[in-house]
Image (cartoon, grey):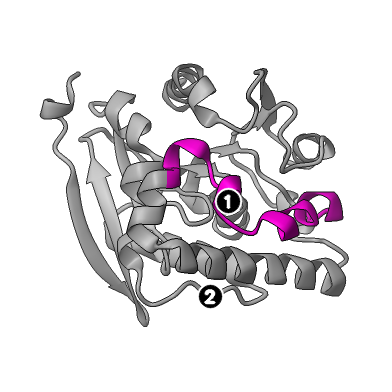
Amino acid sequence: MGSEARKVEEGKIQIGDVEINFIRVGTGDHPVLLLPELLGMARLSFATQIEDLDIEKLTLVAWDPPGYGKSWPPDRTFPDDFYQRDATWAHSLMKTLGYSKFSLIGMFDGAVTALFLAAMYPESIRKMIVLDAKSYVHLDEIKPLQATVVIDKVINYMKKVMTTFYGEDYIKQTMSRWLDTMFRLYHKQNGDLCKQELLKIKCPTLIFHISDNSLLVPDQPLHLKQNIANSTIYFFQSDTPDDLNTYLDEFNKRIAEFLLEK
């Protein structure tokens, strides 16, 4: 189906003391919430899903978490419970839009929010897909970022647009604040982000992991698989592991199969 046939609705909804920007496309009876990565934006992060997935069977809702995309300003903040906070906001957004039960697709940092959503609101989640999610902080993942707290660790295909939209200063500040929180949680919680919450997840879960990903230790997807009851792992293999463009067709194919499977 061509992009001209895909009418994308965009709006803002007040949730508590924040105004959240969202986009919605599709008329299907299976709603899916899309949760972007660090500094991600609804339209940009999920452009190919919005373009390629079956919007007669699915209704796609992508949000800009407060501090990202068109939900910025205000600036992004990272208190110790920011993943739980985002999960609460996202759940309230979907309820306000009229969806009591929906599925999740979370990428990278948004995948951690998805894990919390599925654990905190198990009755609301039909299925969950996470890409390069983690349930704990490992020093080998965050120490290298100290030397490159800037744009070269942002997904390659998003660099130009993100820099134009945010400006380099905001990207640097946001990534630095995120890193500070990761180090703080590592020391305060022995690295635990949501290990216990994994045991509360009831929905069928598909764990995507990019092999040789330089930003995650290899045990992360295995730990998810061992602790999420109804879960499977799908590994992507590539010579360019940090570039999601390499996997987009396969990624979307697997997403569709999993979500539409009865």
The foreground one among 155 and 188 is 155
Of the pair 238 and 197, the residue shown nearer to us? 238
Q: Quadrant of residue 46?
A: top left
Question: Which of the labelled discs sits on residue 77, or is there none?
Answer: 2
Residue drawn at x 84%, y 38% as measured from the top left: 219
> Quadrant of the image for the N terminus?
top left
248 in relation to 36, above or below: above
Which residue corresponds to the image point at 78% horizontal and 41% vertical from the top-left?
220
Q: Residues within 10 Å of mark 1 (few under 14, many from 20)?
A: many
Three-letter amino acid code of the residue under disc 2: Thr
- Secondary structure of the residue carrying tag 1 is helix
Measuring from the top left, give residue 125's x and y in whole percent.
50, 46
Marking on residue 118: 1
How many marks can you see? 2
Query: x%, y% of residue 69?
Result: 35, 59
Q: Residue at x 29, y 56 (%)?
A: 22
Label 2, label 1: how many angstroms apart (C-alpha)?
A: 22 Å
What residue span does the magenta drawing correspond to?
136-159
Q: At label 1, which amino acid type do we have? A: Ala
Asked if residue 172 lies left or right of residue 74, the reply is right
